[in-house]
Image (cartoon, helix red, strand yellow):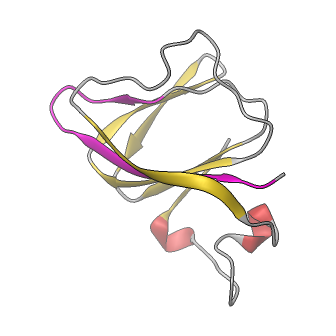
Amino acid sequence: MKRMTLSDLTCSDTRLLPGHLGERKVAGGGVYVFGPGETAHPEARHVHDTEEVFIFIQGRGVLPVDGKEYPVNTGEVVIIEPGEDHHLRASHDDPLVTVWYLMEK
């Protein structure tokens, strides 16, 4: 897992975070609004074979990665590495809004 804030973001003319993700394209993604206390991915293990990027645009929550819980807040950016087991949980008092995307292989 790589973690940074919005002020740490770098870009090329055509890509966000080229130092971390190279020139690969985004394969899919979206925006998701988690209700208070909502958890993503009910399955016991959730992994991808490529990077997944989260940009937190509102609220706060917890991002468990490989069994360790990391607090997340508005303005943070997290890159989940291929094979890392991850789930996302919103706080109980504020919806968590995230932009997420998966990179091409």
Q: Residue at x 66, y 21 (%)?
A: 66
Residue 83, quarter of the rendered image: top right
Residue 3 falls within the magenta-colored stretch: no
Question: Which residue appears farthest toward the bottom when viewing the image?
Answer: 13
Quadrant in the picture for the N terminus: top right
Q: Residue at x 15, y 31 (%)?
A: 93
Q: What segment carries the magenta color?
A: 88-104
Residue 31 location (% of width, % of height): 40, 52
Q: Is residue 13 above or below residue 84?
A: below
* Residue 55 as seen in the image, left or right of residue 80: left
Residue 21, given in percent of the width and then of the height, sits at: 77, 62
Residue 1 relative to residue 9: left or right: right
Question: Which of the two residues, 85 or 67, is positioned nearer the viewer here?
Answer: 85
Q: Nearer the viewer, residue 90 or 70?
A: 90
In x, y percent, where is residue 37? 26, 23
Which residue occupies the foreground of this view, 91 or 41?
41
Q: Is residue 83 left or right of residue 46?
A: right
Tell me: residue 68, above or below residue 44: below
| Residue farthest to the top, as pictured | 44
Q: Residue furthest front?
A: 28
Q: Residue at x 41, y 41 (%)?
A: 72
- The residue that appears at 75% across and 72% down in the rendered structure is 18
User: Can residue 100 be seen here?
Assistant: no
State whether residue 103 appears in this view: yes
